[in-house]
Amino acid sequence: MTDLGGKFKNESNALSVYGSPGNQYGDTMVGGEDVKTINKMLQDAFAAGQAGVGEALVQIGEHKGRNIFEQKAADQIRISLDDDGNAYVKLIIRQLDPGLGLLALAGGFKDQGETDQQAADREEMEEASGETGTLVSSYQIDRRPVAGDVRVWGGPDRADGVKNGDVIAMSTTAMVPVVRNAHLCDVQAGDDATNAGWVKFSDLTDADVFGIKGHAEMLEQAAQLAGIAEQLPQSFSASLQARNTDILVGTPEQRQAADDLIQSSHQTQPRKSAAPKQHFKK
């Protein structure tokens, strides 16, 4: 795929990239040895206290002449319990990389000035709106790097300092509301989700239906926090432990399996695309 960083013409500055054609902004993914290098930069910035706190965006260094930023995001892991205690989780199917065509948590970039909770609530409403249910308990998964989710920004220069050709490496906090019977209501997909719905924990038999490994890991952690880990099949945990790819470029079979899970849930057809919003999407 053509590198979107137009100001970098020298071959020595070329990044290894991949991505789905037609993505408007920010979804040309960094791969190969470059993603390993930038992942290490983000991990080191976390260890040094430079990343993982404070503003929605922090510059953490340079690589091949490009500015590297930590971009903070927030995810929502909304879990619904039925009257018998069976657990369901609200999930989307992404229409963009990373994880094109595979399952993901509702989530996205934090806007400047937002709290993690505000960002998670907003992103859920944009990507998978519907009944939120009666709150039973809530948890938070602390901010963490999202391994492998590293992107070349291909849109116009941003007011927050990210310019065309810069690289953003994702970190996220996940909010975990546990509610009653929200899964009985439809979910409306929107924004960068092609579909959305409630998936029963016991139906999640393979972690490779998630495009982003970190999302599957956070779901497993959320189940442990909520005291319902036994409802995730052992095959889910086994496939997650065996997985050695942070970001999947899904096979047709994996995408079909993800779609089948959503189609069998309580959901409606995706709404038409909304007008572009002022914040930047994950």
Image: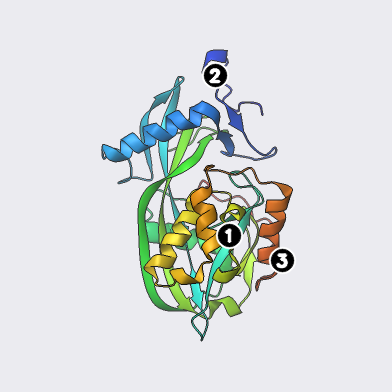
Q: Give the amino acid at mark 1.
A: Glu
**As drawn, 139 above or below 48:** below
Where residue 240 sits in the image (x, y, percent)? 51, 53
x 55%, y 54%: residue: 239
The answer to which quarter of the image holds residue 270 is bottom right
Callout 1: 10 Å neighbours few (<14), some, many (20+)? many
Q: Residue at x 37, y 58 (%)?
A: 141
Residue ID at (59%, 22%): 6
Q: Which residue is mark 3?
A: 269
**What is the C-alpha distance between the residues marked 3 and 2?**
41 Å
Residue underneath mark 1: 127
Q: Which of 127/97 is in front?
A: 97
Out of 119 and 240, give the one closest to the viewer.
240
Contact between marks 1 and 3 (CB within 8 A): the answer is no
Residue type, mark 2 in image = Phe
Question: Which colour style is shown?
Answer: rainbow
Q: Nearer the viewer, residue 180 or 127?
A: 180
* Residue assigned mark 2: 8
CA gap between label 2 and label 1 equals 34 Å
